[in-house]
Amino acid sequence: MDQVRRLCLGKAGAAALLLGGSLCGIRPSHAQSVRPAAAGAPRTVILGQSVPLTGAASEIGLAFAAGCRLYATQFNESSAATGIQLKLLQLDDGYDAARAATNARTLLTTDKVDMLFGFVGTASSEAGATAAAQQGTLLFAPFAASDSLRGAAHQNVFHVRPSMADEAFKIVRQCATVGQTRIALVGDDDAMGRAGLAAVQQAVTDQKLSPLVATALVPSAGDKLDAALAAVQKQNPQAIVLVSLSATTANVIRKLRKSGYGGSFMAFSIVGIDPLYAALGKDIGGIVISQVVPSPRPSGIPIVKEYLGAVENSDQTGSYEGLEGFIAAKAAGEAIRRAGRGFTPAALQRVMAGMTDYDVGGFRINLRPGLRDPARTIDLISITADGRILR
């Protein structure tokens, strides 16, 4: 896994798309709004995305954003007959919810986007959902959003990835299957960490297991981590569930192993396999990570073949996050195609609400699940010291 090469290629790809005149591009927030298409002309549908291209989650954000661009470009090259073109506007928020909120307002009020799309992170997705609701539009395919956005109060939010509750249920069930009933949780003290804690606690309750033996939500900055980990380790957990980005996750794993902890580590998909491997190297061996899309390695799954074919004709390399972005953009494109070039936000919302079993290419998506969607496939994978992925 050549992480440095992947990130450099992701940045180069963004620049190439923008300079090449594509309808996809990263651009500063003062770009002009797009005028409506004249009668009979193709309609340009604008998707507004706030994504961390810098900062703590940039490895995930760059790959996810690049996958979104790949499909948007493919859609535009193959959709002449539909009379629809996609324009993807991507703004960097540095994984800062306040910047994401500002970006959302800019995209909606200045750029006049048709909907918000692919916001990354729990707090940023909540900010995007709020802004979209205020403007009477949609938020589609948030990445790692809180399960609170799946409730009845958020009918304008549509999810491509499974819920944190689904991931937590699979993680906890795996622990129980191998006899690990003493489970602890360590996470960042932020919206994502709190959402993950709630999901794991609910999964433990649903499976009639003993309560978590220890929990620690720790600020990413500061000196409280060592004491928190010592308190967790004192409870002798057999497995520790991690709800944090790659840097914190790697730091926690190293500290606990150095102090003699010999139990298991389980991580949510938000951690990102590539950035975690880059941070841990051979020390990643044995860590179990949930994944919500198929492996991006060559296979017979049609959507994977389609994605890798697009990657082959670009300057990107395949990744889980890139594939998820590709799938998210394809689902958005399909909903827009079904709604037709004259769609209104209400019409598009009705179409999306009806896409409860969309086959994106050998991988089925339910855009309107509840907190739990047992039909969704979530893989638990581990990575060997030399970077091979095992199931």
Image: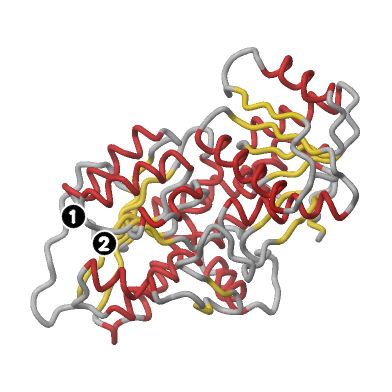
Is 173 left or right of 369, judged from the image as shown?
right
Q: Could you say which disc has been placed on residue 46 in the image?
A: 2
Which residue corresponds to the image point at 26% horizontal and 61% vertical from the top-left? 46
Q: Quadrant of the C terminus?
A: bottom right
Camera-side residue of 180 and 268: 180
Q: Could you say which disc has been placed on residue 112 in the image?
A: 1
Q: Could you say which disc has been placed on residue 252 in the image?
A: none
Is 336 left or right of 287, judged from the image as shown?
left
- The kind of secondary structure element at disc 1 is loop
Q: CA distance from mark 2 to mark 1?
A: 8 Å
Horizontal and vertical percent position of residue 113: 23, 57
**Outermost residue to the left:** 39
Camera-side residue of 291 and 165: 165
Res 169 seen here: yes
CB within 8 Å, label 2 to label 1? yes
Which residue corresponds to the image point at 44% horizontal and 38% vertical from the top-left? 123
Height in image: 354 above or below 283? below
Question: How many numbered marks, from 0 up?
Answer: 2
Is 69 left or right of 212, judged from the image as shown?
left
Q: Check disc 1 and give the amino acid type.
A: Lys
Which of the marked residues, 2 or 1, is nearer the chain's N terminus? 2
Camera-side residue of 78 and 116: 116
